[in-house]
Amino acid sequence: MLPPSRQTAEDEAQLQLKSFVDERGEGTVQEHFDLYRDPFRRGYAPSDGPRFQISDKKQDVEFPKREETLNLDLGTREKISKLYLAISHRIRHPHRIPLEHIHKLYCQLPEPRMLCLTWQWRGRLLKVMGTPPKRDMDSMLRYFALAADVKNAGLTLRRSQWNYAIAFATKYAARTTKHEMESALRLWRDMEKEAKIMGNDVTFNILFDVAAKSGNFGLADMLYQEMESRGIEFNRFHHVSLIHYFGLRLDSGGIRAAYKEMVDAGEMIDTIVLNCVISGLLRCGEEDAADATYQRMKNAHAQTCDMPRRDYMSNKVVNRVLMMFTKVGKSHPRLKESLQTTVQVIPDMHTYKLLVQHNALRVGSLAKVAQYLDEMKHLRIRVHPTIFLSLAKAFYLHGGFPGSEWSAQRLDGVLAALYEAKDSNRHGFRIESWLVIWTLRAVKKCSSNEAVNNTFDALSQRWDIHGDRLEFIHAILENILNDRDMKSLGRRNGEV
């Protein structure tokens, strides 16, 4: 048992973390779930679900060993050596070896290809192909082809490898729909019923996330119950997904309850967690509460040491470090406060993207947008093209009539900032199709055809658009100039 003085210090640290999000008697996460489960909103005892055992047999995983692989000729062995070398380089230097190159080397092997590889290299191949920088259609098809080869060779996929497949099925598209949800459920069923490998915490986090994002809250509720019945312990990712879930349900009390339980569970609170809270509060229409959380993050700037700026590589490393901090903090409570002080809780690009997008598009407050952009510049956070995309949409929505604060003169200032951002960072700042389209629409709405042509010329000297998209952009320009834009393309083009 901890001495009273140490216990008091820990309580104060938790209170400080909880102060980032205001409390309003929101209750517990369980109480919110019980309310949704009860059709009469009276509350009842949740049913006890089935319990399963996890199985991942060693004899299945560790086959084939070197002496059990196919008898291969010299040429094939040389191809395998090249494949092994490429995989090894990819693990050490992810940006130097493209996944397409590794897949091409693999396809040069004779059928059945998977039996040409030892079990260790099969695992490494599936790991690098299952964790691309971006999960898109091409990377998904490559991974599923490898999974099919594993199955056709009479081998089994490990639980982590099935989780990669489920993640691909849910995240290859820009938006999560019923189709992605059904694909994930089908893979989960195959994983547990056919492969006899039970889902773990990663599996359920992926499934819960896709159920919530697709709007199937009943399924999300069922998955939450299943996790509880299997005794799967919540980790950092589950807590963040739960905050996001209540945001999608427009339940600000649930957001606060989920955040409070994350703090009480001893998890590390960082910018990603607070961004999730801000996103949910904005979705619920609680702009003042979201801004209050942002102000507390901004005030923490001077008290927080610098951690790596998040990108594809550092993101995963930072998350692993935070989960390690949580484990250490739970095992050694007296270290918890010092560990939390090393975690970044200051606003980042995503924070400002959330705030600018909401205040520009939904609220239409140019003054508030200008405030956030000014503070963003003060914190030396480099502007992202999506910020300009939100501004262009806002000028299109709110400008174009006398007395509007979203005037042509202010739009000229935004365009000048856009050109400067591109000119000062030509490779890191990309001007792509939708930013060009919405900028042209905004100029047309707020100004004249002459201004549209001038803007088009200026953008054409800077944009990152090639191939068939150029013809598409010129067709859009013609439609905008002739007042046929939305009529010919349909309003679906605005949903980007």
Image (cartoon, grey):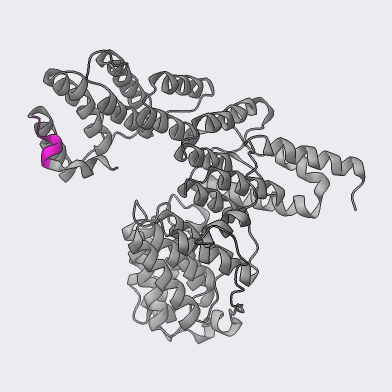
Left or right position of 436 against 148: left
Please say whether residue 332 is one of the residues in the magenta stretch: no
| Residue at position x 40%, y 60% in the image | 170
Range of residues picked out in magenta: 483-488
Count of number-bearing discs? 0
Q: Position of residue 426 (x, y in %)?
A: 34, 30
Q: Position of residue 69 (x, y in %)?
A: 47, 84
Left or right position of 475 against 464: left
Q: Is residue 99 above or below residue 7?
A: below
Q: Position of residue 350 (x, y in %)?
A: 47, 36
| Residue at position x 24%, y 38% in the image | 433
Please say whether residue 484 is one of the residues in the magenta stretch: yes
Q: Nearer the viewer, residue 94 or 325?
A: 325
Picture quadrant where residue 429 is located: top left
Q: Is residue 90 above or below residue 19?
A: below
Left or right position of 1 against 459: right
Q: Nearer the viewer, residue 281 or 420?
A: 281
Q: Position of residue 111 (x, y in %)?
A: 34, 81
Q: Is residue 87 visible?
A: no
Location of the C terminus (image quadrant): top left
